[in-house]
Amino acid sequence: MDSYWQEKLEILPNLSKLAVIYIWLPISGVDVERSFSAYNRILADNRQNLSENSISMLNFLNFNK
């Protein structure tokens, strides 16, 4: 889904920027708590040098097992 909006960046710059942000937003309160736990594991102290792309991929893998 991210790649679709990245391709539309030139044609629809504002919409694609918003879409990329909102794609990853949790839907319910339970999802919010679960995502914080996942982000804590992904962004642990021993992983502070991850690139934005690596964090995005880890996030995707975590929520789409």
Image (spheres, rainbow, N blue to C red):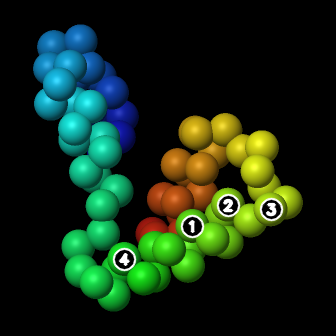
Circle nearer the N terminus (1, 4)? 4
The residue to which callout 3 is attached is 45
Q: Is residue 12 left or right of residue 24?
A: left
Q: Position of residue 19 (x, y in %)?
A: 22, 41
Left or right of 36 on screen, residue 8: left
Q: Which mark is residue 39?
A: 1
Judged left or right of residue 9, residue 64 is right
Compared to residue 2, the image places residue 16 above or below, namely above
**Can residue 11 be seen here?**
yes
| First reached walking from the N terminus: tag 3 or tag 1 | 1
Front residue of 9/14: it is 14
Amino acid type, mark 3: Asp
Give the percent coordinates (x, y) of residue 26.
30, 69
Residue count near mark 4 (Cα–Cα under 10 Å), binned few <14, some 14–19, many ≥20: few
| Image location (x, y in percent) of residue 50 | 72, 44
- The circle on residue 13 is none
Q: Is residue 36 left or right of residue 25?
A: right
Please identify the residue farthest to the right as the structure is shown.
46
Determine which quarter of the picture holds residue 10: top left
Dot 2 corresponds to which residue? 43
Q: Residue at x 33, y 87 (%)?
A: 30
**Rendered residue at 85%/60% (across/down):** 46
Image vertical order of residue 7 relative to residue 41, above or below:
above
Structural distance between the alpha carbons of marks 3 and 4: 21 Å
Secondary structure state at the residue bearing disc 1: helix
Label pair 1/2, CB-CB below 8 angstroms: yes
Disc 4 marks a residue whose amino acid type is Val
CA distance for labels 1 and 2: 6 Å
Q: Amino acid at mark 1?
A: Tyr
Spatial CA distance of label 2 from label 4 is 16 Å
